[in-house]
Image (cartoon, rainbow, N blue to C red):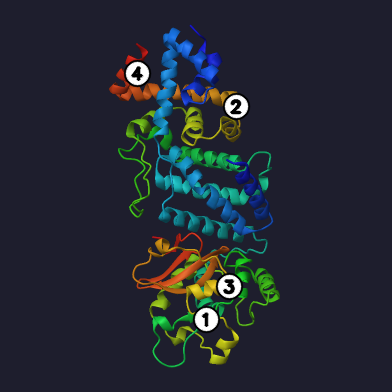
């Protein structure tokens, strides 16, 4: 009998269908003259064929969103742990985080996006608009980091934003990174949006609105104004029930997301892929 | 893994090591499905696989500085993923001790119609479970993930000849296990031998 153990490559290649014509002829000869060789070849081919029937695994949108959220949260923890200025605060850390998340949500709403409400009249969904300038988006995207940061870290971020001419940082508490949201922020933002009123926003007068132009009236206008890659398609937008209203953009860990208001609250999609970022379950 | 993908990975790793988190996100987006596929083959459960993928990318985030660039990033990544998956399997003592559930790899109920549940045939699951860890790793990487043998060898840190041998023997063992479960296959194979 032929010693197959010395010719694993040939037999395997033949079973895989990748053997050269000459090698295939050689293995064919072994198979025709050696029962054990034939059985070995059959085993190889049978296993390969069985395994090739397996479809490639793909993450579902929900799983992908969960994965991204989990990694982001873990990275935020790692960044805090690795920070040389990190101080242990076992008893108050959780509350600090919650409070900071709430503060970030309100401040992001009021200050970062510069919420603009029309003067007088009822506040309807169509009235909602956001003053989101190109420079603020660029600055936020260029400074990915955890939402929580030490004062010194945030001051550095503030300096970078100021250098970019993005916005005045004077009214911003030191623990908030402008334009950078976390999932906690989104969760906190969702409730106030449901009952949106002037108390949540800082109205700007018409002069301010003119001066801060272009004021995005809708998604397409914004996309054209700032040339951001808001490429989420209708299929992606169909994730949202009802008729979603474009709400603005933000970043999470440096990734651009689009925010929509729907009947069920706030929806966030990754701007280029339409993957649902929030809600995740 | 194409050369352009490998080159792009190298650039992204470099940018990430310079502090660009977006580069890390891009690396993850480029490889997460493949890593998930690998972990799913090993863990045999979508939830466990998802946990393993998450742990893999967190490890990559923390230890990217240890990536020397001697191999492709994907090779290093799959090594991290493989080690993570088998470490987790050891921790939960699932691989050897627990019987396979009747229905593994459940479909995500939230997924759309186009999503493939990737359920393995139960007989194939059982046959794969009969393989030892080293054979299992080799056949998952080489035959199910269709990675080149050289890359499998680098991932598992053994000579390529060892991988060839393991894959060959793993297929033989897998075929035997499948035939034992499936009389038709046994008979068909016997007919071919005759």
**Residue in the picture at 47% in, 45% down:** B36
Q: Are marks 2 and 4 on the same chain?
A: yes
Q: Which chain does tag 2 point to?
A: B
Nearest to viewer (mark 1 / mark 2): 2
Q: Are marks 4 and 3 on the same chain?
A: no
Q: Are marks 1 and 2 on the same chain?
A: no
Q: Which chain does tag 3 point to?
A: A
Q: CA distance from mark 1 to mark 2?
A: 60 Å
Q: How many residues crowd around disc 2 within 10 Å: few (fewer than 14), some, or many (20 or more)?
A: some
Q: Which chain does tag 1 point to?
A: A
Q: Which numbered disc covers residue B189?
A: 4
- Residue that mark 1 sits on: A110
Q: Quadrant of residue B67?
A: top right
Res A276 seen here: yes
Q: How many residues crowd around disc 3 within 10 Å: few (fewer than 14), some, or many (20 or more)?
A: some
Between discs 2 and 4, the one toward the N terminus:
2
Q: Is residue A130 left or right of residue A261?
A: right
Q: How many residues crowd around disc 1 within 10 Å: few (fewer than 14), some, or many (20 or more)?
A: some
**Residue in the picture at 49% in, 27% down:** B135
- Residue that mark 3 sits on: A226
Q: Secondary structure at mark 2?
A: helix
Q: Quadrant of residue B126?
A: top left
Residue farthest toward the left in the current orientation of the protein: B183
Q: Are marks 2 and 3 on the same chain?
A: no
**Residue in the picture at 58% in, 72% down:** A226
A43 and B51: which is toward the camera:
A43
Whether B60 is drawn above or below A84: the answer is above
Q: CA distance from mark 4 to mark 3?
A: 65 Å
Q: Secondary structure at mark 4?
A: helix
Q: Are marks 4 and 3 in contact (CB under 8 Å)?
A: no
A61 and A10: which is toward the camera:
A10
Q: Which numbered disc covers residue B160?
A: 2
């Amino acid at each position: 009998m032929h010693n197959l153990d010395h010719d694993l490559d040939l037999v395997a290649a033949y079973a895989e269908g990748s053997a050269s014509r000459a090698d295939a002829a050689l293995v064919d000869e072994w198979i025709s003259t050696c029962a054990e060789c034939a059985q070995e070849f059959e085993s190889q081919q049978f296993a390969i064929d069985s395994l090739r029937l397996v479809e490639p695994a793909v993450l579902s949108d929900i799983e992908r969103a969960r994965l991204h959220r989990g990694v982001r949260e873990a990275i935020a923890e790692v960044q805090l742990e690795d920070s040389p200025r990190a101080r242990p605060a076992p008893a108050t850390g959780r509350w600090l985080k919650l409070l900071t998340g709430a503060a970030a949500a309100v401040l992001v709403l009021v200050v970062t996006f510069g919420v603009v409400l029309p003067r007088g009249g009822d506040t309807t969904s169509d009235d909602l608009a956001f003053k989101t300038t190109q420079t603020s988006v660029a600055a936020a995207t260029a400074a990915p980091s955890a939402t929580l940061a030490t004062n010194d870290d945030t001051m550095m971020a503030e300096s970078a934003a100021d250098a970019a001419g993005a916005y005045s940082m004077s009214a911003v508490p030191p623990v908030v990174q402008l334009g950078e949201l976390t999932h906690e922020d989104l969760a906190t933002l969702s409730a106030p949006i449901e009952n949106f009123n002037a108390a949540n926003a800082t109205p700007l007068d018409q002069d301010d609105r003119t001066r801060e132009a272009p004021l995005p009236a809708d998604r397409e206008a914004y996309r054209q104004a700032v040339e951001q890659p808001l490429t989420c398609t209708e299929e992606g937008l169909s994730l949202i029930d009802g008729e979603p209203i474009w709400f603005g953009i933000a970043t999470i860990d440096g990734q651009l997301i689009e925010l929509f208001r729907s009947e069920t609250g706030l929806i966030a999609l990754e701007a280029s892929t339409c993957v649902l970022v929030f809600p995740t379950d | 893994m194409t050369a352009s993908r490998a080159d792009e990975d190298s650039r992204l790793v470099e940018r990430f090591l310079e502090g660009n988190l977006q580069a890390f996100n891009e690396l993850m987006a480029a490889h997460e499905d493949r890593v998930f596929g690998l972990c799913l083959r090993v863990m045999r459960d979508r939830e466990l696989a998802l946990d393993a993928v998450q742990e893999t990318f967190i490890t990559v985030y923390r230890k990217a500085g240890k990536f020397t660039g001697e191999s492709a990033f994907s090779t290093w990544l799959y090594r991290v993923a493989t080690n993570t998956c088998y470490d987790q399997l050891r921790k939960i003592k699932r691989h050897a001790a627990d019987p396979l559930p009747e229905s593994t790899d459940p479909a995500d109920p939230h997924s759309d119609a186009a999503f493939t549940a990737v359920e393995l045939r139960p007989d194939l699951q059982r046959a794969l479970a009969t393989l030892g860890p080293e054979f299992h790793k080799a056949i998952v990487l080489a035959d199910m993930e269709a990675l080149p043998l050289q890359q499998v060898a680098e991932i598992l840190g053994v000579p390529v000849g060892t991988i060839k041998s393991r894959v060959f023997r793993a297929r033989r063992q897998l075929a035997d296990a499948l035939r034992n479960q499936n009389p038709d296959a046994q008979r068909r194979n016997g007919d071919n031998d005759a």
